[in-house]
Each structure stands twice: as C-alpha cells, then as structure tokens.
Image (cartoon, grey):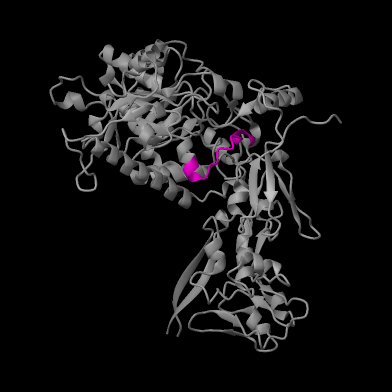
Amino acid sequence: MKTVTRKVEARPEHCMGCGLCRLACQVAHSPYPQNMIKAMKTGKKPVARMTVEVSSNGTEFRSVRCINCEDPECLKICISGAISRNEETGQVTTDENRCVGCWSCVIACPEGAVFGPLEGEARAHKCDLCPQLEIPACVAICPNEALMVVEIEGVKR
Amino acid sequence: MAVSLRQPRFHIKRDQLRCVECGVCVNQCANRVHFQDPYDGSIDSDGINCVGCLRCVHLCPTRALQVVPYPSRTREHGLWDNSALHEIQLQADSGGILLAGMGNSRRQTVYWDRMLLNASQVTNPSIDPLREPMELKTFLGRKPPFNTKLNKECNSHPQLELEIPVMFAAMSFGSVSLNVHKSLARAAASEKTYWNTGEGGLHPEVCQFGERAIVQVASGRFGVSPEYLSHGAAIEIKIGQGAKPGIGGHLPGEKVTEEVALTRRIPAGTDAISPAPHHDIYSIEDLSQLIYSLKEATAYSKPVAVKIAAVHNVAAICSGIARAGADIIVIDGYRGGSGATPLRVRNEVGIPIEFALAAVDTRLREEGIRHEVSVVASGGIRNSADMAKAIALGADAVYIGTSALIALGCHMCQTCYTGRCNWGIATVNPSLTRRLNPEIGARRARNLLRAWKHELSEFLGGMGMNAVESLRGNRLMLRGLGLTDRELEILGIKAVGE
C-alpha cells in the first residue's frame, strides 16, 4: 500500500523566532479562526498546538510541532485510546472526545509537541495539520518561509 | 546624572484594541523599543531608541502599530531645524564624529528628475517590445578602435557580457550579511548580470557564483589571493566610494566574526581597517602598475575596473584611469550608499553622478579614448528611468546597491553601522542575519531586475529603438527641465522645447 505522509517541516536556519506560527495556530484553533483580534481577546486565550524553542543564547530558534512519528510514544502511552495513527497518511490524531486529559502523552512526546489541557478541560492538544485549511495556518503566516509542507511517499507492506 | 538632550526621532502608537500581545514586535526589535511585562503579558514601547525601520509595523499581525515622527519638535526655524539641533546634541553627548548609513540624505536637486526622455511620434515609428525583440545585451570592457578590421586582434580584450545593463554594486561581506551575497549572487546568475563582492572577499559558500562576480581589490586588500582573483569574472580596484570620498573603511572588531575573518583573511575580532588611500597608489602611474599586476596575475583573461567617487576633477581623473589601462571605469556619485560613513562627509563631499557621468563621457570622447573603457554609473539609481537616463548620458551600465537592498527588505533607516539591522541585511549577528532568507531575497532581487528589463524595453521601444546600444550616449534623447544654461551645457543636453 502506498502511503503519503504529510508533514510541516521547519527549517531552523531561516527561523527568526518571531512566533507568528504559534499565534496563527492559536487563532486557527479558536472559535474565531477568521478574526485574529476576536480569537485572542474573547474569553480564554486559545491553546497553540505548537511552540517555538529558543536556544539558551537567544540566537537560534526552532518551530516545534508534531512530526507524526512512525512509532509514536504518545500513542503507546495513551491510557484512554484517544490517540491513533492513520496508516495511510501516517498522521497521528487525538480524539478529543475520548481524551481524559491525563498528561501522559505530553510527558512521553520526545519532541515536546503535545500540549496539556487548559484549566477546566480534559483534552490534550497537538498539531492536526489544520484539516480545514489548504495550507496549515503556521506555514501560511511564516514571514520567512521557514516552514514548509512536505509530503513523504512510502510503501506500507 | 545629567539629563540626555537626545530627542526621540519616532513615536510608537499602539492601538490597544488591536494588539493581541503576541510579542512579535518585542522579539523582532534589536533596538529594544518594545517590551513585554513578563507577568501580565502587556506590551509597551519607548521610541527613544527607535530608528524607524518599520520591522514591527510590517510584522505586526493585527496592524496595531504605527511609527510616526516624534510629534514634539523644536520651534520652527529656517536655519536651526530639528535635525540641526539633534546633531549638535548628539555630538555634545558623545564628542565624536557623527556616523550615518546609506547615501546622502539632504534634499538636493535630483538631476535625473530634471531630465526627460524622448518618444517617437509620426515621423518615426515606435516599437512594441511585446511583439518585437529588444536587445539589451551589453558588453563591458575595452573595445577596439572605430575602424579596426574584424580580426583576431580586435577580440583580444576580455569582456563582461550582461543581459541587462544593471549590476549589483559592491557591498562587502561583513558590512552586509552572507545572505545578502547569496541573494544577489543567485539573482545575478539567473538574470545573467554581475554582482560585486565588495572589499571583504568571496565567501566559500558563494564561490559557485564566482563567474558572475566582480571581485574587488580595495585599500585593505581583504581576502585578496590568487584563487580570489581567479574566481571572479572581473576585478575592480576600489579607489573611492561616493558616500565617503577620500575616506577609508572601518569594520569594527565585533563584526569580524569567524566567518568574516575567514573570508577577509584576518584574525577574528580584530578591526578591519581599509586605509583612505591605497598605500601603493600615489599617482596614475602607480595605478597603472596595480592594474597590470592584476592583469598579469590573471593572464589578461579578465577586465579590470577602477571605481572612484565622483569628485570635482572627475573627468581628468577618469582620462588618467583610462590611460592607465583600466577596462572599465566605475563612477560613484555623491548619493552612493555606505554601511558606515561620517555624516558630514556623506552629505557634503562629492558631486552628483549626473554631472560626473556627462563630464567623463564628454572628456573621453573629446580625447578619442571613449572606446578604451566602459563607463559604469553608480550612486542613487532608483529606478529604470534613472538607468535609461544614465545610459543616454553615456553610461554603458549602472550599478545598483541601495535599490537592491531595498528589494531585499531595507527600509532606509540609515543605521547600518550599528550592526543591529532588524531586516537582517547590514549585520553579521546570527540571530538577525537569518531574517533574510536567501531564497526569498534572490527571488525579489531577480524580480527587480526583470521589472527594470521590461521597463527599459518599453522606453527603448517608445523611442523607436530596438537595442540599448542605440540609446547609449545618445543625449539627443534627453531634454532638461528647469536647468540653467550652464547645467545644460555640462550635461550636454538641450532644454525642453528645443
């Protein structure tokens, strides 16, 4: 079976640490994805499903999100069976209705790409590649083209 | 502590209703104008250190920011205006020479704007460049005399072959980032023109674009080696620069990073000082020696250019340079840019490129040696019209430096010398240089060249010409508007209506 894994690839050499990807992620996953100001100013601030890491000397940056591992630690550790991996697309997804907010995946993820539940809710947040958008919000907003969508073709036996 | 009398140049207006406190302005400002409260996330700004580069304005995702001239000005005065006072306060604070970046900032007459181009009407047909071929190919280098029979002899002088008569001007690695070199080199290679390394050597990562590079030999001789000379398509001896005629260069030690040191072949962290003169050039004869040394070193396979700042006796100097054996003369007018130059020198020394170019072309023609050199005009070429007018005044090609940097994102804040260029251009700080992605830079510089190419073709077509050769030195295609008789005479053009 032919598989196509879609990934957002970060190019740290072009990343300037502006954090607009994180903002766009928050907005895209808020109740007001079309209105940045409303999304960020109405009620609780939405959670970003990715983050930007800064090196200790402040000169290097890396935009971090789920890289859809082949053998995901989050899936293995999930106590409620909320995390699954689509064998065809290679995408690891969280069923937010089944998630109980136990933080296991947040701790297990070697990339630090799963984000814990907000106060009062019981679900973990991770990159879903913005299924509602043609290009993921973070890639679309990156002012220095440091983020790219890549499609890796493979064969699943 | 005594109160500082330095005035803020800009005021930051933040629309709190639009600000979402994302922190982009905070993390993108190397001058630390914006700051975020670590506890409540609120952002505030202080314009005292703002240089007006508009980085925050462009990156603010909700357009919540405005950078406006500081509204409190000193009382109006025709002589003692705000900047006159500001400059005195700065010097009273520091006791030092005022530094500036980019070219002359004074409001002097831009003579390009006082010249108008011609077009064909009725008596000769104009040409549509979208339907008919338009030849913009330009060769730079020594040409055979007018009546030479076509034989081997006449092809013996090496030439640079340009598909469009614009090249990227010399900007050294160190004064600009490596990503600037990568961007311009790629653009020059794809559009088949040339870029110039500046005096800071050729970085190994751009060596592959060497055949589209003009390598510069300046008074500091940074990075000059047999390999360096052999990598380039041509060699340029830099005598002077329009932004600072008579002044050398000084790249402070903090900008001499490992990479810059490697390229310049000097120890990291040491000041890179280019003396004001070449210490082996004190006459035209000395210049001739260097020209022929470089020609010998490269087996007469590459043209040698000499770049000078446009100064009062430019025509006589250029005549000497032509006779010294240069293949190309580059004249840099007083609007030429710089990464760091004393403000007074930048604004007060040198002459406009329009006059220098006209004077040099006239002089070389009178002396019958115009064919022996190509003339490249530089310093404040803003658009394709300036380029077309320069060619009509007698230039073979033009150099663009500032225009190219603006295409890469420069916003003319004129503080290149601080090393805190928020657009990642005039800096070697790794956290800033990566703000210029060379793929984007190359694309934008290439687009600029292509756009100018289209516009130049339109100008030529309008004048009924199908080759840029027909416009070269064709001053009949220019008319002067609002110029004195003497100015018209020096420019060698007629007044409008004549």
Q: Is residue A64 visible?
A: no
Residue B30 belongs to the span the image colors magenta: no
Instruction: Pick whichever, B36 or B197, lies toward us.
Output: B36
- Residue lying at 63% horizontally and 50% vertically, measured from the top left: B56
Q: Is residue A100 above or below residue B267?
A: below
As drawn, is B359 to the left or to the right of A62? left
Q: Residue B176, percent across and down? A: 54, 38
Q: Is residue A87 visible?
A: yes
Q: Residue B433, percent across and down? A: 57, 46
Q: Quadrant of the C terminus of chain A?
A: bottom left
Q: Is residue B443 above or below residue B348?
A: below
Q: Residue B321, percent across and down? A: 37, 16
- Residue lying at 15% horizontally and 21% vertically, measured from the top left: B148
| Residue farthest right in this picture | B1
In magenta, the rendered stretch is: B406-418
- Residue lying at 46% horizontally and 32% vertically, measured from the top left: B170
Q: Is residue B79 above or below residue B269?
A: above
Q: Is residue B315 above or below residue A151?
A: above
As drawn, is A96 to the left or to the right of B1? left
As drawn, is B80 to the left or to the right of B172? right
Residue B408 belongs to the span the image colors magenta: yes
Q: Which quadrant holds residue B292? A: top left
Q: Quadrant of the N terminus of chain A?
A: bottom left
Q: Residue A124, percent across and down? A: 69, 79
